Image (cartoon, helix red, strand yellow):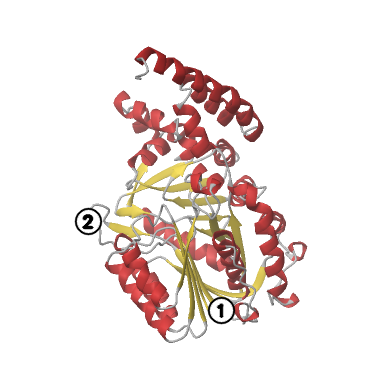
Amino acid sequence: MMIPVMEFWRVITVLGYLLTFFLIPWVLLTKKNNPASTIAWILAIVALPIFGGLLFIVFGINRVRRRAAYKQRATSRIAPLLPIQSDQQLIPGESEDPFERRLMRLATRVAGTVPTVGNRIEILNDTNRTMGLIEQAILSAKQSLHLEYYIWQPDITGTHLRDRLIEKAREGVKIRFLYDAIGSLFLTRSFLDPMRQAGIEVAVFLPGRSWAERWSINLRSHRKLVIVDGQTGFTGGVNIGDEYLGRDPSLGYWRDTHLKLQGPVVLQLQQIFAEDWYHATGNELIDADLFPVPNQTGRTIGQAIAAGPDRDIAGCHALMFAAINDAQHRVHLATSYFVPTPPLVTALETAAYRGVKVRLLLSGRSAHFWTILAGRSYYQSLLEAGIEIYEYTRGLMHAKTLTVDGGWSLVGSPNFDARSLLLNFEVAVAMYDESAASQLESHFEQDLAHARRIELADWYARPIHHVLPENFCRLFAPVL
């Protein structure tokens, strides 16, 4: 017997309000540290009883934290394997610079790593050279290769590098490949099967092994990692795909920053990969061969910073806030996605009001135009504070770099937005080194030649049909 239409909608309405009744206490318990987010979710659930509730279930619940204890177990098993000698570690209090000491203490507390000395870190600002060096390192592997990527495209670039991995696997190199389920959505079975058949272990990072984690589509691994024989590492902003080599005409020239690392800091990257591998597969990587004694091949003090929703503190967010807030002379920030959290906006503006020269190099073009619009909604107050804002025009700006006072820098995968800093799994390397900061500042100056400066007077004169979409997109800032 058919249920009358009115009766059907009455049942749906009752179910919707029952869902609302149960979800609002849940929101109050899980979002208590973010009042704005709490109010937004409650309004969404009340205004749209079923749709809003479903949105919260999919996007609003951090199911990853439930396995944090298991991840900590993996960390405790791996940490004793790290053969970083005492003379390769720097106790934060040993630094002569008070600014460095403060940032070292904070980074050590929020990331669980220590500053290491004797690292050789090469800053790469050309994606073609970056890809070539990664391929060279892969072909030189003797024992192990670990790769973790947010985006790996099954195009010419991705297929070429996949085939190099297959060659090394057939030579006997142990290879583990971890990719994000959403970022690498187009990796099909036909692309991955040849890797598996060659003996490569392939795993996907979220959706995880549990049924609950299969709903965690809002929490992504945005990390880019390559570790070769535990001795050479790569990390930064470059994924694997044709567009990163400037082969996508709609995006044009691709400007990115990546790091090639050797020394003790590589073992910290290996530890991050091992923890992610455990999170995705439940398998512990505790073979001592994966953690060889590092060579001190350089002079840079480096510290790997892992951040993600499985941790108590948003590490990269805290470190960026502290560094900007402590700046005395200058701040240079380059980022692809600029949708900052309120504390970061306050830090930038306060620094500028204190007389710090703050310059932002942002992307004027993006594959996700709504992030550009949302970012522009912040420009007026930043410009009024005296901050210089530039939009890159040569192509797509995808670098994620921060330098402060010419002596400290952070390079990695996190953008300057809430998604990267509060929701995603990210990795970066903090460098306490004037030479590295100077090189990054030099790259920054070179990029300004391909950027247009945003002037406050012009910004005041914008038509309202520009302002409205920008302010509308800003409403979604917490998840962009």
Q: Is residue 417 visible?
A: no
In the image, is 356 to the left or to the right of 95? left
Q: Which residue is mark 1?
A: 231
Depth check, front residue: 182 or 421: 182
The picture quadrant where one finds residue 137 is bottom left
Please, what is the three-letter code of the amino acid marked with disc 1?
A: Gln
Q: Secondary structure at mark 1?
A: loop
Mark 1 is surrounded, within 10 Å at the Cα level, by few (under 14), some (14 to 19) or many (20 or more) other residues, namely many
In the image, is 377 to the left or to the right of 437? left
Q: Which residue is mark 2?
A: 249
The x and y percentages for residue 340 are 50, 40
The x and y percentages for residue 97 are 70, 60
Q: Is residue 267 visible?
A: yes
Q: Which quadrant does the C terminus fall into?
A: top left
Residue at 51%, 42% (x, y): give it: 418
Residue at 35%, 61% (x, y): give it: 187
Q: Secondary structure at mark 2?
A: loop
The x and y percentages for residue 243 are 30, 59
